[in-house]
Image (cartoon, grey):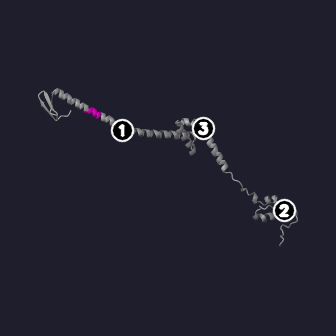
Amino acid sequence: MDTDKTTETGDNTEEKTGEGDTISVSKSDYEKMNQTLGSLKREIKDLKKVKEEAKEETKETPQKTHSDGKLIERLDKMALQVAGIKESDEVELFNKWKDETGREADSIVGNDIFKKEIENMRTAKANQAATSDIKGGGDKSGVKDNPDYWIAKATKGKDGKLEFPEETPKHLYSKILDKLSENEPNSSGKLKFYNE
């Protein structure tokens, strides 16, 4: 109600509105109206307060969801740790299962199909690691650096003399000759070459 001027006379209160009309109200009704107006203002104030609290709760809800997300992430990490899943590709498989099935971590880790996939992945990795270390060629034992090895590989030619394979290392020629000279019964321990 829009009031411009209020006048009190005895038991009656007159109120003039902007339109030129005058309303007469008894003093008790006027006081009752003011009390009602005051209580309405308090209710409006209380409703605004409740509305602000509701806004604050909605602001806190994302934080709770965020902390819930952190809690779920920690539970997932614990489940992975208990299951012995540490490798990045295994964690990636776990996350794929979680996204596709919507299951919780403990039910994924306990799933027989998931366990079989992890086992197959680990077996494939172990096989790859085992076969990647195999290298061909190159004898590291030093057998080929022994003159006896090349003497054993030698064959007798048509003239009865020893013929060595072409792959005989040149740095072993002198050692092979020394070894052969030791085994010769008529030798004085030293070989004679054609140019001596």
Residue at the extreme left? 10
Q: Which mark is residue 56?
A: 1
Q: How far is disc 2 from disc 1 in space, using C-alphas?
A: 101 Å
- Residue 13 vertical position relative to residue 177 in the rendered view, above or below: above
> Disc 3 residue type?
Lys
> Disc 2 residue type?
Leu
Tell me what residue is drawn at x 47 percent, y 39 percent.
71
The boundaries of the magenta stretch are 41-46
Q: Main secondary structure of the magenta part?
A: helix
Percent across and percent down for residue 89 are: 57, 45
Q: Which residue is disc 2 drawn over?
A: 162
Q: How far is disc 1 from disc 3 in space, using C-alphas?
A: 45 Å
Q: Which residue is disc 3 drawn over?
A: 115
Q: Earlier in the sequence, mark 1 or mark 3?
A: 1
Cβ atoms under marks 2 and 1 closer than 8 Å = no
Tell me what residue is drawn at x 66 percent, y 50 percent.
132
Tell me what residue is drawn at x 61 percent, y 38 percent.
116
* On-image quarter of the C terminus: bottom right
In the image, taking residue 153 as reference, residue 60 lies left or right, namely: left
Q: Is residue 87 visible?
A: no
Q: How far is disc 3 from disc 2 in space, using C-alphas?
A: 64 Å
95 part of magenta stretch: no
How many labels sit on residues? 3
> Disc 1 residue type?
Glu
